[in-house]
Amino acid sequence: MALGFLDRSRIVAPAGWSRWLIPPAALSVHLAIGQAYAWSVFKPPLEKYLSLSGAQSALPFQLGIVMLGLSAALFGTRVERNGPRWAMFVSLCCFCGGFLVAALGVLTKQYWLVVLGYGGLGGIGLGIGYISPVSTLIKWFPDRPGMATGIAIMGFGGGALIASPWSTEMLQAFGVAYDNVGRVVSVADSAIATTFLVHGLAYAVFMSVGVLLVRVPADDWKPAGWNPANDKAHALITTANVSARNAIRTPQFWCLWVVLCFNVTAGIGILEKASPMITDFFRETPVPVSASAAAGFVALLSLANMLGRIVWSSTSDLVGRKNMYRGYLGVGAVLYLAIALFTNESKVLFIVCAMLILSFYGAGFATVPAYLKDLFGTYQVGAIHGRLLTAWSVAGVLGPLIINAIADSQKAAGKSGPALYTTSIYIMIGLLVVGFVANEFVRPVNAKFHEPTGEKVTQ
């Protein structure tokens, strides 16, 4: 059990506590751990300094996403029991500690330490820090779950908006030099390590705000004027509750697992490779993309990722979760097709399509906790969400693997430019279509999986 200052009983909100103080607590954690989406900024310097391939430099990010899903699944029930302050503190220690271990790895040129620190230890911090603010906000905003989860997960998507330009400037200040087409020319011995060190210390301070601010509602609390029975207007919304143990026995859970996995795979491949990808796409055009412009592209994707999480997930409160996923998956496939057909003919078209794809990618994360709440109720929704995030673990390996492995093989065959990514793009289109079909099979959960009526539900 969590003890003392971190104990759940110490953070039960008193009467009159404003629930609008909780989103800043959630954002302080999610904006920090959302740095993971800026990993592509570190790829070229690491590849140059440690002589890595594109696939090798993706390993810390891939392991981080794998550990995010696994730690969320393994510790989801404990997070619900011990409370968000305990979870946020553990997340802070693991995530920031991962940066410090990674800094040591770069300094000693032991890449396995970078993978273990940023990906392994940091990934545990990602998973525990990811689910706790989400489940806490759902409990504070049961009347607007799509908006609530959008607020929290918006921060995770927006983390790279801060981290990408900040990291690029820091790398350059500490000794990473780029040419006019975005290639790394040289890397000073301490440049990457010092950047990792500053990240770890700065994020520790920032995440501490969430640890201090967060509260949970009292067991009998509900928003003024809200009646749970009124939510039954949509067929997929239940007033019953399903345990995490029972949820994974339902076909609905596995349909959503496929939906999330393939929607994430289609977006994360671009996100992890964003900086070198736009550079490759337009390197052979009259106006190539510089390192600073590529970092700006990463920031734009982060902005789209962030805004999509709040805008589209809030919209799902009005049109329903199932309809929103039809848009994420169906329209996303069309946007990928546009990139494949028009390749590098227009930077504007490429950027707009990529931003929309990433807005749907981020929105998929923000909408899925509300989808789970609709289908399974609020009881153990955090633990169910944690188990579902194993789909993210799979996608975190699958997406970058597809993009990097195919790009590396095409490069070895002497190809360049958009040809490095064409095959990958068509694979992503196929995955989105499969996800679209899986979403169509989602139906209300059979009553045999519900918790007995009248049984006391504890968290």
Image: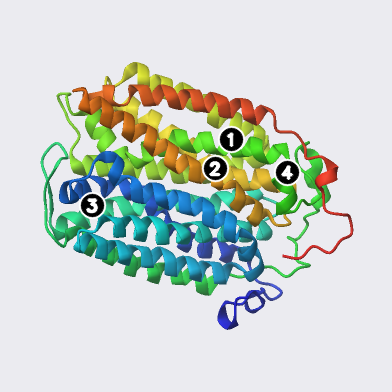
Q: CA distance from mark 1 to mark 2?
A: 7 Å
Q: CA distance from mark 2 to mark 3?
A: 30 Å
Name the residue carrying label 2: 391
Amino acid type assigned to the residue bearing label 3 in the image: Thr
Q: Nearer the viewer, mark 4 or mark 2?
A: 4
Q: Earlier in the sequence, mark 2 or mark 3?
A: 3
Viewer-side residue, 153 vs 435: 435
- Quarter assignment of residue 276: top left
Residue furthest bottom in the image: 4
Mark 2 residue element: helix
Mark 1 residue element: helix
Q: CA distance from mark 4 to mark 1?
A: 15 Å
Name the residue carrying label 3: 168
Left or right side of 40 for 260: right
User: Which disc number belongs to residue 249?
Assistant: 4
Q: Earlier in the sequence, mark 1 or mark 2?
A: 1
Amino acid type assigned to the residue bearing label 4 in the image: Arg
- Asked whether the residues under the numbered discs 1 and 2 touch, taking CB atoms below 8 Å apart as contact, a structural biologist would say yes
Residue furthest right in the image: 454
Q: Nearer the viewer, mark 2 or mark 3?
A: 2
- Screen quadrant of the C terminus: bottom right
Mark 3 residue element: helix
| Percent coordinates x, y for residue 343 in the rendering | 30, 20
Q: Earlier in the sequence, mark 4 or mark 1?
A: 4
Q: Badge 4: how crowded within 10 Å, few (<14), some, or many (20+)? A: few
| Percent coordinates x, y for residue 61 in the rendering | 37, 49
Q: Earlier in the sequence, mark 3 or mark 4?
A: 3
